[in-house]
Amino acid sequence: MAKTVTAKWLMIWNDDAVMRSVGWDTEITRYNGEFKLLAVHTHRDHPYSIFPIVPHKWIEILGYLCPHQISDAWLSQQAYMLDIWQRIDVMVKHDRYDLTGNNNDTVFQNRPMLEGHPFTSGDFDHVDTRNMRMQDCVKLANYMKSAGLSTVFLENVLAGRQDAWENLRRVDVNRQQAQSTIDLENKKVTRIT
């Protein structure tokens, strides 16, 4: 469906989201012509773009927005590695049961959770899934380079000279996100904040 849209920006939205800002679309169009992932203000300003907004070019490059259930994390991690994550002045209420106590419906109760089990195929942190995310990130970086945009941050990440999550930690003002180290040989996960 996203491939057929001609809009300049694509926004992933949920049935439990409520737009709080008037003129939110004007705020997005301020970034026309830029290759960024835009993040609205949500619950406690989560460091991921919970309702990711990306330029249409994203889908032109990859052929899809996100191949995984956890699109906010997938797209945000790529944006952090490419140094193109941008918070904008738009407020959204995420009226999700575990956040507000509302909307404890069958959709919320029965949603598959493909994270937290990194040794299970298809999990967000499984080695194959992480590799796919990085391959997509490199494709996006190749486009950026061809458009004259800087890819120095990712190049430094790949060379081991840059912490990929430095910017994520900087905007994680409420310490909502932890990173994990995964020991494939011993099938062990260590959470680090």
Image (cartoon, rainbow, N blue to C red):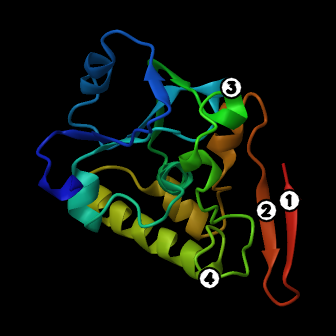
Q: Front-most of 170 and 37?
A: 37
Instruction: Tell me, yes or no, whether the two marked residues, 4 and 2, touch with CB atoms within 8 Å.
Output: no
Residue bearing the label numbered 2: 180
On screen, residue 131 versus residue 25, left or right, reads right
Question: How dense is the environment of label 4, judged by Cα within 10 Å: few (below 14), some, or many (20 and up)?
Answer: few
Instruction: Tell me, yes or no, whether the two marked residues, 3 and 1, touch with CB atoms within 8 Å.
Output: no
Mark 3: secondary structure: helix
Residue 61 sits in quarter: bottom left
Q: Which mark is residue 172?
A: none
In the rendered image, the quadrant that contains the N terminus is bottom left
- Residue projecting furthest to the front: 106
- The percent position of residue 20, horizontal first and vertical second, equals 45, 14
Q: Front-most of 177 and 85?
A: 177
Mark 4: secondary structure: loop
Q: Earlier in the sequence, mark 4 or mark 3?
A: 3
Instruction: Tell me, yes or no, whether the two marked residues, 2 and 1, touch with CB atoms within 8 Å.
Output: yes
Q: Front-most of 30 and 143?
A: 30
> Which is closer to the viewer, label 4 or label 3?
3
Residue bearing the label numbered 3: 100
Residue drawn where x is 40% and y is 61% of the image: 66
Q: Is residue 42 visible?
A: yes
What's under tag 2, amino acid-wise? Ser
Q: Which mark is residue 191?
A: 1
> Which is closer to the viewer, label 3 or label 1?
3
On screen, residue 131 versus residue 34, left or right, reads right
Residue bearing the label numbered 4: 121
Q: Earlier in the sequence, mark 4 or mark 2?
A: 4
- Between the C-alphas of marks 4 and 1, the distance is 20 Å
What's under tag 1, amino acid-wise? Arg
